[in-house]
Amino acid sequence: MYSGKGKLVEWTRVDEAAKGFEIQVPYYFGIVELDEGPRVSTQIVSVDNEDDLVPGLPVRMVFRKLGEGHSEAIINYGFKAEPIVDPHS
Amino acid sequence: MTKSEKVAIISTGMTEFGDLYEYEITGIANIAIHEALNKINLPKKEIESLYVGNMGSHLFEGQENLGNLIATYAGFTCPAFKIQAADASGAVAVRNAVKAIQSGSKQKVMVLGVEKMTEATKQYEAQLALASGLDTNWETRMGATMAALFAIMAKAHMRKYGTTREQMAQVVVKNHYNASLNPKAQYQNRVRVETVLNSKMLADPIRLFDATSLADGAAAIILASEEVAYSYDSEPVFIHQVKQGFAPIALHLRDSLTDLSGTEFAAQKAYKDMGISAKNISVAEVHDIFSIAEILAIEALGLVEKGQGGPATENGDTSLKGSIPVNPSGGLKGRGAPLGAAGVAQIIELYDQFKGTCDERQIKDIEYGLAHSMGGSGGTSVVSILGR
């Protein structure tokens, strides 16, 4: 079982979207290391201030709608990461 | 290594790289194929196998069964097949052709690297085709692009070694300069650091001018065993080593964001089997799919120390007149990056450098030349060493 928590390893701000992510630009994308060890590639959401995004930042994985190509396309769901603003909460 | 394991390049042929709208894929293939055959008056029936390196004909044009297609329209009847390893397709095709000669089963084979990318903007989706070399489920569907992954590597490299945005731009300035001396290059224009820094952002800190662009092109080489090579060339250029290195396809599965471990493995194995070190390399053609990729590559190849890729570029060490010239052809950035053709074109540039036919971009007193090709964000790496 995974706790759904981890830390940001590295990130970027994407201005030229991947196919299906056009309506979300600019978006944050990065690599997260889960507390249990494995790493994943993921979007980073609920970012209030880009300056908060530093390696080691605690994040939690959340369930979200992933990219959608157009209005009639199948909607994909999956995980994204959001910063844990107060790690003690 | 015993002498008989060397494989000779006995001829080459290549199109210009760029927007070749007037030809379809078989058309550009034919230009390269026939140039290579005609240079040495070699009848087609003497080619025993045709290795076609191509990344995305199925996505760019909806065409597969490419080996047979190319053979049909070129007039070959020998076994022909496509080898696909993302951007490293051409280099992996070269490696398999070299192995066929080394095994003794073939005497003369052709490698054709070819890519027709400019049709995609009209009919297919180029971005999706380019991203197909990544891990679709675990990267692309999570929002990754090629630029985003190299941006992450760039940021990690900047953080760890202090590499600067300007140093990355210097890679582009150098490669455009070299390309301006290469008549077959896609880009003949020189650029300034400011041009790069003011271009459109793709994924911070990667900008449009850090990236390669869509191009059409074909590059062919004819390989032969050492025994028969001297019938065609009294001073052959040999491929001494072709090593392939592995790293996981997804960047997040790799131990390091700043080390191209597959490239390091391939390079070290090549140097070791050759009994040389990186110091014996006089010129290198490396996989500059983005500017940061050249910095990562020259470090992984041991041409500069770890962390010195940026400063070495800034100091001019990798320029035509520097201590280790990198991408004299203009690289993927300047000469152009028709993906499957790129790895074969690197071999042709080194061949031309050994033959002394590179005019203003000629490197003098070459001991060994190195070619480095990479697939995706660095999962597949191929390192070749050429010499006399």
Image (cartoon, grey):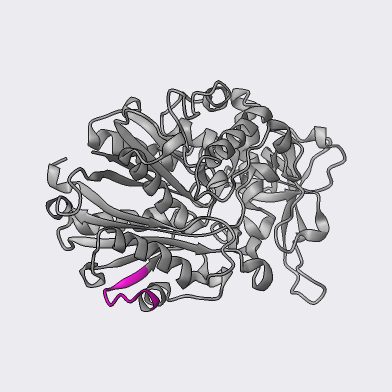
Q: Position of residue B80 (x, y in %)?
A: 32, 72
**In the figure, residue A50 lies in which quadrant?**
top right
Towards the viewer: B295 or B353: B353
Residue B218 vertical placement versus B208 (above, below): below
Q: Position of residue B6 (x, y in %)?
A: 20, 46
Q: How many marks?
A: 0
Q: Is residue B175 left or right of residue B341?
A: right
Q: Is residue B120 left or right of residue B30?
A: right
Residue B51 vertical placement versus B6 (above, below): below
**Which segment did they paint magenta?**
B73-81
Towards the viewer: B26 or B157: B26
- The quarter in which the N terminus of chain B is drawn is top left
Residue B84 vertical placement versus A4 (above, below): below
Q: Is residue B265 left or right of residue A78?
A: left
- The quarter in which the C terminus of chain B is drawn is top left
Res B257 visible: no
Q: Position of residue B200 (x, y in %)?
A: 76, 45
Residue B320 vertical placement versus A11 (above, below): above
**In the figure, residue A30 lies in which quadrant?**
top right
Q: Is residue B77 magenta?
A: yes
Q: Which residue shows up at 43% across the image and 27% down it?
A: B324
